[in-house]
Amino acid sequence: MPEQRDYFEEVYEVVRLVPKGRVTTYGTIARYLSLRAGARMVGWAMNGCHNRPDVPAHRVVNSVGVLTGKHFFGGPTIMQQLLEDEGVRVDNDRVVEFKTRFWDPMIELTL
């Protein structure tokens, strides 16, 4: 019988690799892990890790840098504050200079 994958743990492993001061996206993680349910599966994983301080979920944003998961941090500004504490500027719930802050595991983990 084939081994069953623990998708959430695989997502968490990738998110733990996102460096401070950088962000990635739900879809990017899904593509890296070849998840069939795609970005939605990564979103579910992120929503499920609010009690996991070892997973820097605040570094995962939507495809254009918007803090779509901010409501799962216990307050509307906590995700932004966590990012700003790492030097990531956020304006109107969007990462400023998103393209320069973007971390792609397909590129970064093959270097």
Image: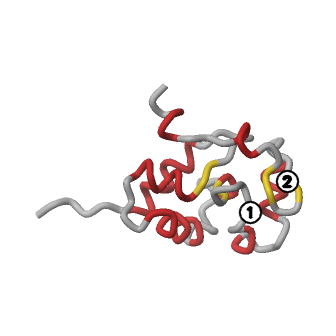
SS at badge 1: loop
**Type of amino acid under label 2:** Val
Q: Position of residue 25 (x, y in %)?
A: 60, 54
Residue indicated by mark 2: 90
Q: In front here: 47 or 99?
A: 99
Residue ID at (85%, 66%): 77
SS at badge 2: strand
Residue indicated by mark 1: 67
Residue ID at (20%, 60%): 3
Residue ID at (50%, 48%): 14
Which badge, 1 or 2, is on the more N-terminal residue?
1
For label 1, count other residues whose C-alpha is less than 10 Å away and answer few (under 14), some (14-19) or many (20+).
many
Residue ID at (82%, 59%): 80
Q: Position of residue 100 (x, y in %)?
A: 73, 37
- 15 sits to left or right of 94: left
For label 2, count other residues whose C-alpha is less than 10 Å away and answer few (under 14), some (14-19) or many (20+).
some
Q: Position of residue 1 (x, y in %)?
A: 11, 64
Question: Is 91 located above or below residue 49 in the figure?
Answer: above
Return the residue found at the far top.
111
